[in-house]
Image (cartoon, rainbow, N blue to C red):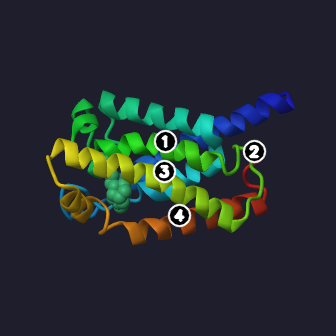
Amino acid sequence: MSRMALGDLHKLVWTALLAAMIAAGAYLIVPIGPVPVSMQVLFITLAGLVLGPRRGMACFLLYLAVGAAGLPVFAGGASGVGVLMGPTAGYLYGFVVMIGIVGLATGGRSRMVSFVRGFLFGVLGLGAAYLGGVGWLMYSLEMSLHKAMAVGFYPFILWDLLKIVFATACYRILVRYSILR
Ligand SMILES: O=C(O)CCCC[C@@H]1SC[C@@H]2NC(=O)N[C@@H]21
């Protein structure tokens, strides 16, 4: 097999693996209200860093499509088009942008990035996810900004920042030990 084809196969395997990890991270939830605690932010950050913006966004759009088609990949094992219009849909759309922003940190080139760079891009991406998530909560559940922040932002932000720290550390380990290529 040519070096190019092997590289493509490698990326394909990582794309499938990360999509499965995002689904697993969505499956285990802590239901604390209309928005559950989940591990999606951890694996979405890792997916962005590993896959880069284009492949990362394509991977997540495919994830949304299979979820809409009936595979139980959304929070708590939910599925169907209804989820893409439900209270947490804004986060799901925001994640498309988040993966794209996080992916810019590496360009998907499996290169070492500083911890600060990975973290900053993760935080910028998380901002997009929360913009979508909180904005959609206000619209779909007719909440005030104050209420939407209370159910969709404050309970999660600290833990989500920790998930970004952990994802960045994992990415750096994968690069350091040449696991990505
Ligand atoms: O329905 C879905 O699959 C999306 C769930 C979104 C949960 C959001 S993501 C940001 C915040 N952090 C969490 O742990 N949960 C919420």
On the rendered image, what quadrant is the N terminus found in? Answer: top right
- What numbered label is drawn on residue 164? 4
Q: Which mark sits nearer the N-terminus, 4 or 1?
A: 1
The type of residue carrying mark 1 is: Val
Q: Is residue 168 above or below residue 60?
A: below
Q: Is residue 110 found left or right of 146 in the rendered image?
A: right
The residue carrying pointer 1 sits among few (fewer than 14), some (14 to 19) or many (20 or more) residues within 10 Å by Cα, namely many
| Coordinates of residue 170 in the picture (x, y in percent) | 62, 63
The residue carrying pointer 2 sits among few (fewer than 14), some (14 to 19) or many (20 or more) residues within 10 Å by Cα, namely some
The verdict on label 4 being within 8 Å of ligand 1 is no
Q: In the image, which is nearer the foreground, mark 3 or mark 1?
A: 1
Q: Is residue 33 above or below residue 20?
A: below
- What numbered label is drawn on residue 97? 1
Q: Residue 127 lies in what quarter of the image?
A: bottom left
Q: CA distance from mark 3 to mark 4?
A: 15 Å
Q: Is residue 75 found left or right of 43 in the rendered image?
A: left
Residue at position x 77%, y 58% in the image: 112
The type of residue carrying mark 2 is: Arg
The residue carrying pointer 4 sits among few (fewer than 14), some (14 to 19) or many (20 or more) residues within 10 Å by Cα, namely many
Do callouts 3 and 4 mark residues in contact (Cβ within 8 Å)?
A: no
Q: CA distance from mark 4 to mark 1?
A: 16 Å
Q: Secondary structure at mark 4?
A: helix
Residue at position x 78%, y 33% in the image: 6
Q: Secondary structure at mark 1?
A: helix
| Coordinates of residue 92 in the picture (x, y in percent) | 37, 43
Q: Is residue 154 found left or right of 113 in the rendered image?
A: left
On the image, numbered disc 3 is attached to which residue?
21
The type of residue carrying mark 4 is: Ile
- What numbered label is drawn on residue 109? 2
